[in-house]
Amino acid sequence: MQITLVSCPNGMGHFKRLLNLALYLKKKKINLVCTQKQKKKFRNIKNSNIRLRPILKEINLKSNPFPKLLKLYNKDFTNYDFVKNSDIIISDNIINKSFYKKNFFMLSNFFWSEVDSVYSQSKKKYLKIENTFIKKNFFFTNRYFCTKKADKYGKKLNFVNDNFQQKNFSSFNRKNILVYLGSNEKINKNFYLSLKRLNYVIFTNNEKLIKIGCKRFDFSIKSFSKLKYIFAKAGLGSITDSIKHKVPLIVLRNKKNLEYENNLKKILKYNIGSYIEKDISLTNFQKQIDFIDKKRYSKFLKSFDRFKFNGSENIKKFIKIYEK
């Protein structure tokens, strides 16, 4: 059986979720369609069964996404033999006319029409495609962090990841914070410089912050176990890492991003973190740290116990139906 996974070509979260699924499925032939940037970030994958296919162009879907999504919808994937010969295609938030076949499924926590409030002719066209997809195709959605539309029509799964979740955690004396933000995030440099005044060691994935003295984070299980907080946007990638390793979140709020706003509501509902507004300062950041500490840090850690990570196993069982 040949399986093709197609990542949304925007950022790393969608790609990472599909990569986790590919590693979990352990099939002989798995194609993972991605961008060059996504491939470069995870080029050290030691799994000969997974073939990265960087045939997508990086797309910024943070503003006016619908013309870009329509263009992506019309891309002809049948030009690629590995797509044409695939028994199953699973995409992450991507709808494409080439995928309208019996064995096509999608992973989606939200639909674009829900999380982008701009109304245009392009949105109207894309909404029509989206509604047709919902009626004709099958998709999986995260039971904890999905939007209303995805919750109503999707098949509910737990996190699509491996089954691992930190069982034990260190004492409250952990003194590390992970600043988990992309290089394009526009935040006053003085805020980053002033982070050093905190009684914490600051780790990061951001090259700009590494240049001014923050430590590079290696994303190992051991390193996550030493974190006390993760400071990040409310994307599902950082939320998954937070829940998986039982580290409370301090979210950088973005009211304009309706997907992030939906996720932030769930973060507060499940009591796994707090947030600060866009006009951040070290004082406000320290207030949120104090807020979680004073609310009894152990209660936040206990909140993580409700989450499960068997979504990949459920997809694996579902795929077995087609292994005939």
Image (spheres, rainbow, N blue to C red):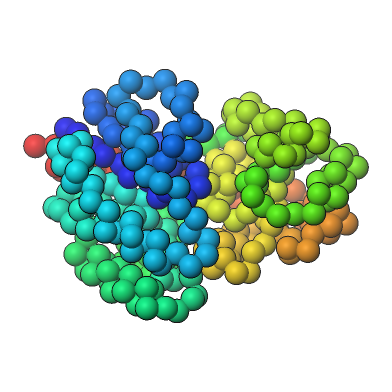
Q: Nearer the viewer, residue 213 or 269?
A: 213
Q: Could you tell me how many numbered marks the image carries?
A: 0
Whole-percent x and y of residue 301?
66, 46
Q: Is 111 left or right of 180, judged from the image as shown?
A: left
Residue found 42% across the figure and 41% down from its top: 35
Up-down relation of residue 168 to residue 105 (above or below): above
**Residue 195 quadrant:** top right
Quarter of the image where one finds residue 320: top left
**Residue 197 as seen in the image, left or right of residue 74:** right
Residue 197 in view (yes/no) = yes
150 relative position to 81: left or right: right
Q: Quadrant of the C terminus?
A: top left
Q: Position of residue 48 (x, y in %)?
A: 33, 20
Instruction: Residue at 14% x, 52% y: name it.
Output: 102
Q: Nearer the viewer, residue 147 or 156?
A: 147
Q: Who is closer to the viewer here, 322 or 90?
A: 90
Q: Residue at x 26, y 39 (%)?
A: 4
The image quadrant of residue 84 is top left
Pinpoint residue 139: horizontal percent, then vertical percent. 29, 57
Provide residue 157's location: percent of width, then percent of height.
37, 52
Locate the N terminus and report the quarter of the image it occupies.
top left
Residue at point 57% right, 34% down? 167
- Is residue 156 visible in this depiction of the protein? no
| Above or below: residue 155 compared with residue 182 | below
**Which residue ends up furthest to the right in the rendered image?**
197
